[in-house]
Amino acid sequence: MTDLAKGFCNLDYIVNIFTSTQLNKTTPKLLNKINIHRAFSLIKSSNSIFSKISSSLFFLLGAFTYIIRHQPAKTPLLIASNPPYAGILGICFKLLKGGEYYFLLQDIFPESAAISGIIQSHSILFKILDKLIYLTCKYAKNTIVLSSSMQDYLVQKYPDIKSKITIIENWAIEDIPTCNKQDNKFAQKYNLTQIFTILYSGNLGRLHDIETITEAAKILKDTPIQFVFIGEGVKTKIVQEAIQTYQLKNIFLLPYQPRELLPLSLTACDISLVSLIPGAESIVAPSKLYGMLAAGRGIIAVSTPNSYIDKLLTASGCGINTPPNNSQYLAKLISDLAVDSERVKLMGKKARLLYESKYTFQHALKEYQRILFE
């Protein structure tokens, strides 16, 4: 969202933002044409469900007040689905002020919550949230999704809003110059230059198959192969427990790195990893994929066969898909790639070419501009 705001600002638009994200030292410097308003909250941010729900309610209350008092009816309103029920703000904006809004649906909700085990798919709460998402999409001028599989799922679920659904895929959040791992200062700092390195960078969340990756690392614990996890989430503890219980020296766990270090951290490996649990392939589109493509590194995806990611990697030749819950298969694939440097390099080159042809920020920005201001 920061990229979009700065991109529109560079196109001479004035951008107003209402967010629950609090000001901190990592907040990037923005241009004068961007005005940021921050929601008040008594709850400290954390990974707990209680914290997320509580802070989202403070956000909804503050955002509703802001929209009704300060949002001009003629100004396009873009709502990101974080929290997923933020779409209620758009419905209020349309019904109370006659304005138009656009809904950026970053994952299919409430299915994502059901797959994660947060709510039951047959519960009353699920049905209420499902109805809210439908009404949000119905009243929106346009609903933006991140992949063709998400579009297909939504069209099948809500066929009457088919004409209102648009795909705009994400991008790498930093420009990433390609470089050799041996010349990478991040790789040098953590002694990764001389060992075959597998990188998982991003959220270790409920919808990601961290278990299969961790089990593969246990299988390969006595080989010259290093696993690096960079990120945080509710499944971080799975990696931590494996390291402690099995005394794994081949897993290196780091917290999220500053945004400016991404060009170095994403290129400090030989192969990147992306994973989804079964059932999530049509529900979410992992944004970490685009940074991996931009880094010019081949990708191993852990996802259901014929998923959106599987088709993308297979068609382009920049990666390989492996089935979830099959750590032996994943470990064998990594072992084979570790001794096949030419194949690894070729996958990396194809990944970079795919990124440059389809997934740059400027490409996405033009699509947002077309949708919002057509």
Image: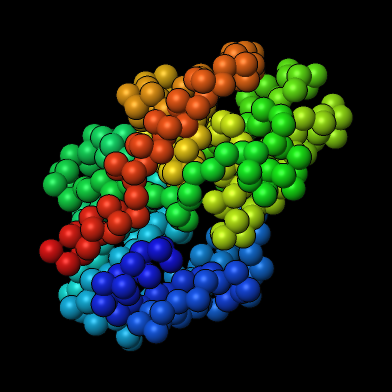
Q: Where is residue 353 in the image (x, y as percent from the top left)?
A: 36, 37
Q: Which residue is drawn at 22% across and 63% down?
A: 369
What is the quadrant of the N terminus in the image? bottom left
Q: Quadrant of residue 91?
A: bottom left
Number of labelled discs?
0
Question: Of 171 and 59, which appears nearest the observer?
Answer: 171
Q: Position of residue 327 (x, y in %)?
A: 63, 18
Task: Name the residue furthest front.
Answer: 183
Q: Is residue 119 left or right of residue 66?
A: right
Residue 123 in sight from this viewpoint: no
Q: Position of residue 97 (x, y in %)?
A: 21, 78
Q: Is residue 276 left or right of residue 270?
A: left
Residue 259 in sight from this viewpoint: yes
Q: In which quarter of the image is residue 337?
A: top right
Q: Which residue is drawn at 61% across and 39% down?
A: 181
Q: Residue at x 59, y 32 (%)?
A: 270
293 to 3, vertically: above or below: above
What is the quadrant of the C terminus in the image? bottom left
Q: Quadrant of residue 268?
A: top right
Q: In this view, does 353 lie to the left or right of 217?
A: left
Q: Residue at x 48, y 49 (%)?
A: 177
- State how the image is colored: rainbow
Q: Is residue 339 left or right of residue 363?
A: right
